[in-house]
Image (cartoon, rainbow, N blue to C red):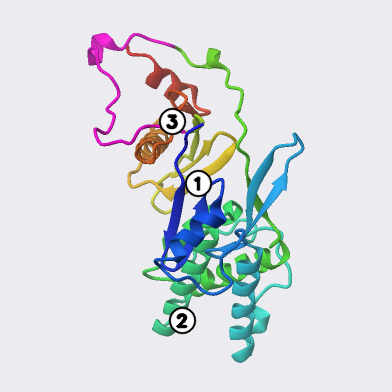
Amino acid sequence: MRYYAYALLYVDDVLMAHHDALTALRDIDKFFKMKTGSIGDPDYYLGVKLRKMTLKNGVEAWAMSSSKYALAAVANVVDQLKSRGLEHMMPKSAANPFKGGYKPEMDVSPELDAEQATYYQSQIGILRWLCEIGRIDILVNVSMLWSHLALPREGHLEAVYHNYSYLRNKHNARMCFDPTYREIDMGSFKECDWKTFYGNVNEAIPPNAPEVRGKEVDLRLYDDSDHAGEEVTRRSRTGFFIFLNMAPVVWFSKRQPTVETSIFGAEFVAMKNGMETLRRLQYKLKMMGVPLSGPSFIYGDNMSVIHNTQRPE
């Protein structure tokens, strides 16, 4: 089967996707010299530990772990607190990223001074990167704290320490990228004739897209929202996952920019945000020559939104 080889470049890190990656890396090394001894099987990339694992179904899959990065981040915070005699600020253990019932938007503790505010912002950046490299379990909490970068309070910084205590006890997480295909129940998706509304149109394919090669992949989006979850502004939060085959590739949590007066409105906005991200991902895959198996599939739990988006009338 014909396929494309990909070289993923991030500053001075190179990751090769190829059936003979070592030879390809040595070819690159002829023109762009790499660090001695650095060419080999992928081990550590952008803060994550990479390894192959065999799943219960016998399929080999790559997995990534942010344990080393998380423990290093925790150690830096602990050292900083000890240097100021404030090690008691870090809880010894935390079962969850937030204390029970804590809502950052309701926090009225004193504002941080300029130095502490800068420190808070830097720690949110570190936690945000942990979310990017697979710690989905703290994504919502970090997103909430992210909303207070401009005017952080003492309680917000304490919540950061609470997150680190949680990570210290639960650092050993791993995300697996399962390449197998999910069996999709096509009966769940209603087919309708949209030509009356849109005419006889086809999907817009980039004119300069490369020839597709390799195995087809399918995309699935799961979206949701919490209606008026933020108590001060009554704004809702969008959350969604996108899977490529059985592998999670996009995870998202963000406060919606508008105030929706109904659950339907909040769920509809969440689906719209997810669909737009899905379209961008489809475009990216097409420009990388990756073939899609067909239409992407969107799943939600609000039947009003589902009925109002899959029927032309």
Can residue 226 be seen here? The reply is yes
Real-space Cα separation, disc 3 to disc 2, in angstroms = 49 Å
Mark 3 or mark 1, earlier in chain: 1
Q: Residues within 10 Å of mark 1 (few under 14, many from 20)?
A: many
Label 2 element class: helix
- Residues at circles 2 and 1 in contact by the CB criterion of under 8 Å: no
The residue at which mark 2 appears reads as 116
Mark 3 or mark 2, earlier in chain: 2
Image: magenta residue range: 191-213
* Residue at horizontal 40 percent and vertical 46 percent from the top: 235
The residue at which mark 1 appears reads as 251
> Which percent across, then down, holds residue 240?
49, 40
Q: Quadrant of residue 272?
A: top left
Vertical side of 296 occupied by 201: above or below: above
Q: What's the residue type where badge 3 is placed?
A: Pro
> Which percent across, then down, holds residue 143?
47, 56
